[in-house]
Amino acid sequence: MIKIIYIFFIILVTTSCSINPIDNYHGVAFLEKKQKKLSINKSNKNDIIKILGAPSTESILENDLWIYIENRKSKSSLFKLGKEIVLTNNVLVLEIDKKGILKNKKFYDINDLNKINFNKNETKMSDKDSFVYGVLSSLRQKIDSTKRNKK
């Protein structure tokens, strides 16, 4: 009887473990394939929404900028203790004119995003006597004074 319970327990444990990796999708799946269906100066906002859905982010400047994101992560092997690996990280930037027609599209994959250089310079405050600096330093002093009073 105990052997049957052990066999049942072993079968239960081995069948509940998944051999296939678990992928976490965020954003639009298969963005690279879908963006090829869009044509510049022909596709409009309705076509874009039909193919890609609602944008992840919208920016309104002179022309509308719609940004679509695809991010796919997977758990690594047991030897790496299940650390997440980024499989795809794609970004599509669509520029739409005032009439709703697609004017420009830029597709960035994970290799393009790794090549982006960021500026290492820091912004320095030029005027310490500004209104915002005075308000924030006053708030900081009030917060610090309550900590001192509690001690």
Image: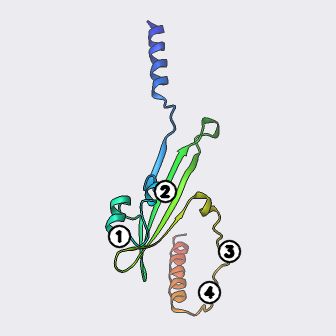
Q: Which comes before the other along the chain, label 2 or label 1?
A: 2
Mark 2 crowdedness (10 Å alpha carbons): few <14, some 14-19, many ≥20: some
- Secondary structure beneath label 3: loop
Q: Nearer the viewer, residue 59 or 148?
A: 59
Q: Label 2: which residue?
A: 32
Marks 2 and 1, how far apart at CA: 18 Å
- Secondary structure beneath label 4: loop
**Mark whose residue sits in front, 2 or 4:** 2
Locate the C terminus and report the quarter of the image it occupies: bottom right
* Residue ranking furthest to the right: 120
How many numbered marks have been drawn onto this rendered protein structure? Answer: 4
Q: Amino acid at mark 3?
A: Lys
Q: Label 1: which residue?
A: 44
Contact between labelled residues 4 and 2, with CB atoms less than 8 Å apart = no
Q: Amino acid at mark 2?
A: Glu
Label disc, if present, on residue 120 of the rendered structure = 3
Q: Which residue is pictured at 43% across the width and 66% down the height?
A: 39
Give the left or right position of residue 112, taking residue 51 as reference. Answer: right
Q: Amino acid at mark 4?
A: Met
Residue 86, how many percent across, how many down? 57, 51
Q: Which comes before the other along the chain, label 3 or label 1?
A: 1
Q: Label 4: which residue?
A: 125
Q: Which residue is pictured at 50% across the width and 51% down the height?
A: 72
Q: Which comes before the other along the chain, label 2 or label 4?
A: 2
Q: Quadrant of residue 66?
A: bottom left
Q: Quadrant of residue 35?
A: bottom left
Q: Nearer the viewer, residue 125 or 144?
A: 125
Contact between labelled residues 2 and 3, with CB atoms less than 8 Å apart = no
